[in-house]
Amino acid sequence: METVIAVSHLQKQVLAAAANNNKETLNILADINLSIVAGTSVAITGTSGSGKSTLLGLLAGLDVPSAGRLALFRQDLTKLSEDQRAALRLGKVGFVFQSFHLLEHLTALENVLLPLELGKHSGDLKQVALAALEQVGLVARAQQLVTKLSGGEQQRVALARAFVTQPKLLFADEPTGNLDRHTGQEVAALLFRLQRDHQTTLVLVTHDESLAAQCDAWYRLMEGRLQRQEQAA
């Protein structure tokens, strides 16, 4: 199977303020090694401040590592410019965030249309977007401003937007973090169903271990390193 993400000895350090106006090096990620194959789901858990979102940003090419090798779709991200990394993601990578990141002045349909228009897709884009909303059970709310939707509905719009371009890879950062337990379970079930239906590779960052346990592989981030977690058969 195709390897979508390949990481070896990845490190990330940042400069932080210290006493006497000095700077000190803060090690966020120390030695990350990870391989993710196409069509699988991988969860990364860890305590607040452990570097989960930092790692996700590196894997997606939104940030650059301090050291190590990182390949996305067999392209070495450490050798690409910011524009080249963005071009590599276009149409291939989707995102779902804890805070939805929808455009509040747009309707549900317009939010889902946006990545199709930016990606210069052809055909009847409105029908493609409506079909995506239908997949998440929101076609009847297509013309509603997203500010008029509940939190669960907004996250379902975010899922429709993420999957509408048929991405090969989806990054989800705490996708149920702002939802109550029942709504979170519904959104999680929808996320995994869409991932299976679309054969999308999923990288999920979450604090919810019950969510992580549903993935094909589960890693815990501790002291800058990933530890594989045993899962029930």
Image (cartoon, rainbow, N blue to C red):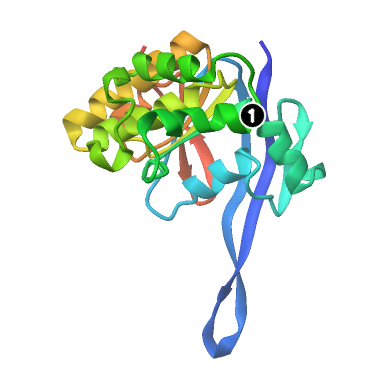
| Identity of the residue drawn at 55% across and 18% down | 166
Q: Position of residue 76 (x, y in %)?
A: 78, 36
Of 166 and 54, nearer the camera is 166
Q: Position of residue 60 (x, y in %)?
A: 61, 38
Identity of the residue drawn at 35% across and 24% down: 213
Q: Amino acid at mark 1?
A: Gly
- Quickly name the residue at label 1: 119
Residue at x-position 48% and y-position 45%: 52
48 or 197: nearer the viewer: 197
Tell me, yes or no, if residue 177 can be seen here.
Answer: no
- The residue closer to the viewer here, 168 or 6, is 168
Q: Dot 1 surroundings within 10 Å: few (below 14), some, or many (20 or more)? A: few
Q: Is residue 219 above or below residue 68?
A: above
- Residue 169 in the image: above or below residue 96: above
Give the number of marks: 1
- The x, y position of residue 55, in whole percent, is 56, 45
Q: Tell which residue pokes out farthest to the right in this image.
A: 79
Measured from the top left, where is residue 32 in percent x and y? 61, 41
Q: Residue 17 falls in which quadrant of the image?
A: bottom right
Quadrant in which the C terminus is drawn: top left
* Viewer can see residue 50: yes
Residue ranking furthest to the bottom: 20
Q: Quadrant of the N terminus?
A: top right
- Label 1 sits on a secondary structure element that is loop
